[in-house]
Each structure stands twice: as structure tokens, then as C-alpha cells.
Amino acid sequence: MFKTLLHLLMLGWCCATAAHAVERLRVATEGAYPPFSFIDDQGQLAGFNVDIARALCRRLGKECEIIAIPQKDLLPGLAAGRYQMIVSNMSKTPEREQWAEFTDPYYRTRDIFISRAGAGIDRVTPKTVRGKTLATQADTPLAHYLHEHYANFALIRLTDTLPAAFTALAQGEVDLVLSDNLSAFAFMRSDAGQNLDIVAEQPIIDELTKAARIQVRKGDIPFRDAINHALRDLWLDGAYHRISARYFPFDIY
């Protein structure tokens, strides 16, 4: 793993043009994480992350190309120089910091458990989930959290995307889903999520509260700082709040 990471970092360093020197920025996002990123009715990438990325490109004076990349491939692709920036709900962890530089937060969230309404699950403890099936998205800190805290008591099911976990819950294939609260609220407002509910008593654990950040190539401190400056500008002039209001009826920062 370390050799692979080192090779990718060297490849990105040797072959990629510095982000501040290019006229067109390539930005990666997951593409299957509504309302942050999704394919709209016209077949185009849309969502909060997409709008934030475009706003940042404008502030940086760059053209913007936004591409959809599976979650597990985002950091390796950045390290290999396939794009200059990731805007995809990623929190900072020691493992991820080996791959990339992280900006200041661009939104904050808390992870929660949701179940089907009337399922009789009013709190999440090892005792109440014994024998049940818990789901979340694979290759995420949430997946690690479920395995670490509940694998000895419950079945853990990992899905390629978070919407797939929500769908499995709505269809009765799993009993609980661990998700960030913003994505959960968005799905629960959709027709498919009408029978879902938030578990009343959530575990109070710091690791379930996180700040989402933008990633740039490891060592590209000037570009990271430029994004931080652009983020502050978006916040101060109200552009950030106008974008947020398109997707969320409450403050997400």
C-alpha cells in the first residue's frame, strides 16, 4: 500500500502541471451522493458540491471541468495527477492526509442512524442492534466505524453508494443505515424515503461529527491556500449561502 501511494505521489509530482498554472481545472466528485452530487434529468452532474466547485473555479479565474469518480478511486486519481481538486464530502483523517492536502472545512455534518418508521428501534446500542443488519457506504470512515463498534453484534452490509444503502433500508433489506445527516434528510424528503425515520437516541461520539474539506495534491500548499481564500470570499459575499439554500433549508456550516 505504501509503495503504491509513493509511486502515485511521485507520478503526480513529476507529470502534472501545477494547479495555479493551468487555465482549466479538472475537479472530481463522486457523482452518486445526492444532494451533494448526482446526475440530473438532463444527464448532467449537479448538486451542492458541483455548484461549490464551479463557484471556486470562477473565483480562481479558471475554467472548470467536473468529472464523476467512484469514492474509492478519488484520492488515488488525485495523487496520479488525473485532476487537481476533489470536492466530495471528504473529512480529514490521518490515512487520507498521506494522499492529499486538505482545505479549511466547506460544510459540517453529523452522522446519524436511520431506520424504517415503526421498526421499534429507538436507540442504537450493541444490545438493540444484536442480530440486525446495519448498512453504509463502503470505503468510508462510516464503514470503519460500523465494523469497529458493531461487527461483533450485527451483520454489516456495505454498498457502493449511500443511496443504495437508503434503498436497501426502504425495501426492508437492512434494518439501519449510518449516514451523514444531510444526505439522510434529503433522501427522507424524497418519495422513496417517506417510510424512513431518524433513530431517536443516537450514540454521542465525537467521531460521528465531521467537517467536510476539499482536497488538492500532496505538497501543493499554494493551491490549497488559494482555495481557502476563495472559500472565505464565497462566505463573506453571500454566494456560499445562496448555493446552500438551493439544497438545504438550514445552515450546514
Image: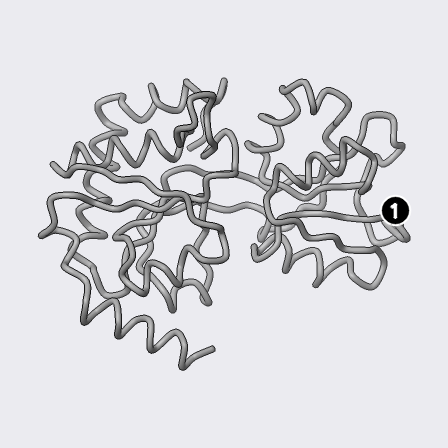
Depth check: 228 or 13 in front?
13
Position of residue 139 in the picture relative to residue 106 (left or right): right
Tell me where residue 206 appears, x and y as whole percent: 58, 51
Q: Residue at x 70, y 56 (%)?
A: 146
Mark 1 crowd level (few <14, some 14–19, many ≥20, 10 Å Cα): some
Give the quadrant of residue 236.
top left
Secondary structure at badge 1 equals loop
Position of residue 197 in the picture relative to residue 68 (left or right): right
Give the colour scheme of this rendering.
one colour
Answer above or below: position of 30 versus 188: below
Q: Amino acid at mark 1?
A: Thr
Answer above or below: position of 80 versus 194: below
Tell me where residue 84 appears, x and y as whole percent: 25, 52
Q: Residue at x 21, y 23 (%)?
A: 237
Q: Residue at x 33, y 52 (%)?
A: 215
Label total for image: 1
Give the quadrant of residue 63.
top left
Residue farthest along the front direction in this orientation: 43
Tell me where residue 131 appears, x and y as whole percent: 90, 52
The quadrant of the picture occupied by the C terminus is top left
Query: Which residue position is annotated with label 1?
Result: 128
Position of residue 96 in the picture relative to residue 58 (left or right): right
Q: Residue at x 17, y 32 (%)?
A: 58
Residue farthest along the bottom direction in this orientation: 3
Tell me where residue 235 appears, x and y as whole percent: 27, 29
